[in-house]
Image: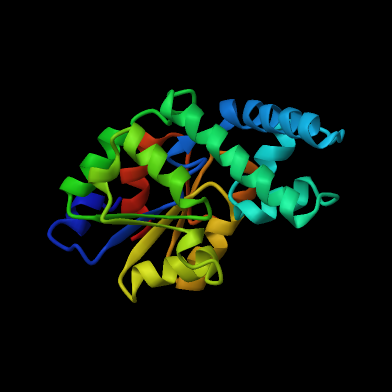
Amino acid sequence: MKNCYYYSMGTSKIKIVFDLDGTIFSSSDILEPSYSSVIQRCNSGWNTSYLIPSAQKIISLVGRPGKEIIATLFPQMTLEQQKIISDSVLVELIRCIRNREGKIFPDVPSVLKKLQDAGFTLFIVSNCRRAYLEAILETYKLEKFFFSALCNEDDPSAGKAGLLKKVLNKSKGVMIGDRASDGEAARFASVPWIGCAFGHASSELQKADAIIHSFSELPEAIGLVI
């Protein structure tokens, strides 16, 4: 079995790129309450009766760009209404994050430190919005582990695959994420994909090069795929 620390020591060219939601952070407990609060408030103000989507439906869309999520959940809304919903849900989610109502997965800080100390350079590539990403990193004191963090707002036309390729810049690397879209991005960038079965979509990991069931398994999995 390869030892990830041996293979990475002293070679910062190896880049470990993480998805955010469902990989480092879980929004499962805050999504439905945030949408519910916003939809109820907007229904009251607009004199409408939009239905509150189920937690299962919302979670099934996590990992897509925010505009796409809102358009899928509320296709009957005008673009202006969709933007109001999107911005309002973001504010509510950030409030919950700042109050630590979401959670990072167990062992995230300690494993990130181990990887960093071993010589890997760590990045985040996510389809989330910048304010959401920064709220998580700041609230849970994770900024110090990452060389940079890119999100959909940095280059909406690039998509996750384009952002990943930009981050790698022809360097050797690994993509870590819980969605098939993470695997698609990894294939586009010609790097291995480690799927996170503890995330939002364990059924989407069939094509992963390795699968982890807890964040603590990540160093060993990296050693297997690099």
Tell me the quadrant of the picture where the C terminus can be found.
Answer: bottom left
Above or below, comparing residue 136 to residue 37 in the picture: below
Q: Is residue 183 left or right of residue 122?
A: right
Residue at image location 42% in from the left, 29% down from the top: 98
Q: Nearer the viewer, residue 104 or 178?
A: 104
The answer to whether residue 108 shows anywhere in this view is: no
Residue at image location 21% in from the left, 48% down from the top: 116
Q: How is the image coloured?
A: rainbow
- Residue 54 horizontal/vertical position (percent): 75, 31
Task: Please tell me in which quadrant of the rendered image residue 119 appears.
Answer: bottom left
- Residue 80 horizontal/vertical position (percent): 73, 53
- Residue 200 horizontal/vertical position (percent): 59, 39
Q: Nearer the viewer, residue 200 or 95?
A: 95
Residue at image location 50% in from the left, 27% down from the top: 96
**Direction bottom: furthest residue:** 170
The answer to whether residue 85 shows anywhere in this view is: yes
Q: Is residue 122 left or right of residue 22?
A: left
Residue at image location 35% in from the left, 40% down from the top: 137
**Direction left: furthest residue:** 10
Task: Please tell me in which quadrant of the rendered image residue 13 appears.
Answer: bottom left
Counting the numbered discs, the total is 0
- Residue 221 horizontal/vertical position (percent): 37, 48
Q: Is residue 162 left or right of residue 141?
A: right
Q: Is residue 145 left or right of residue 164?
A: left
